[in-house]
Amino acid sequence: MTITFPPPPPLPSPPPQVAQKVGIPPPRCRPNSDALIHLHAMISEKPEKNGLVESEFGNQLRRILDQCTPYKRKYKESVKQYFEKGEQLQQQMLEQEGAEEEESIKKIKLLKKRYAINEYNYKLCLVPRACPNRWNSYRSCWEELSPEMVGEFKQHGMVHLLCSAERKGVERCINNLVSRVLHEEDDEPSPSSRDNDLMIVP
């Protein structure tokens, strides 16, 4: 009499490999968008006072960037707190030592961290609205990187080379926006800006 055993159950399939995300780009890899913050302030806070020419382009751009007003408000408040409270804490530290001094240092670091976070969030709102196509190219490039590649470039001091072409494309778009708003009197884009997506009309 032959005894047969049922075949063994199939081995469980390995869990699917989830690609690790590379995370937020370090500061050296982010597009320089300081000019966009200044431009938003100029066109949203009495533009005629800043000598800006009234144009349909400027009006459309203002409506788009004003969508980031809540982030702007938090950013400006954090800047004020960082400089005002930070200066007070630094003055107090002159007369402090030990635990009191360490507590003041912690408070200054917290103010600086809030300032940096609110600045990043504000820029993260402004840039994709001002230069959507260029921003999407930059974001796609960064999201395709692996944490291992970013870490290796950091180790060799070359992290700024990652997605540098896409980052510079965003910066050119921002510079063209600023130039057009400040110097043009009509609604036609200048030749230097024709190859960039300056903005989208909502």
Image (cartoon, rainbow, N blue to C red):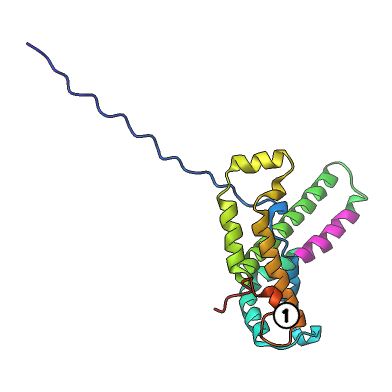
Residue shown at 77%/51% (left/top)?
109
Q: Nearer the viewer, residue 172 or 120?
A: 172
The extreme top residue here reads 1
Q: Main secondary structure of the magenta part?
A: helix
Q: Amino acid at mark 1?
A: Val
Residue shown at 70%/69% (left/top)?
174
Indicate the quadrant containing the C terminus: top left, top right, bottom left or bottom right.
bottom right
Q: Work out whether 125 lies above or below 143.
A: below
The residue that mark 1 highlights is: 181
Q: Residues within 10 Å of mark 1 (few under 14, many from 20)?
A: many
Residue 119 location, quadrant: bottom right
Q: Nearer the viewer, residue 153 or 118?
A: 153
Residue shown at 61%/72% (left/top)?
197
Left or right, residue 95 beside residue 141: right
Q: Nearer the viewer, residue 101 or 22?
A: 22
- Which stretch is magenta? 79-91
Say if residue 118 shows up in the picture. no
Indicate the quadrant containing the N terminus: top left, top right, bottom left or bottom right.
top left
Q: Position of residue 106 (x, y in %)?
A: 77, 48
Residue 199 counted in the magenta span: no
Q: Position of residue 87 (x, y in %)?
A: 86, 59
Q: Position of residue 48 (x, y in %)?
A: 77, 87
> Is disc 1 placed on a helix, strand or loop?
helix
Q: Position of residue 94 (x, y in %)?
A: 93, 50
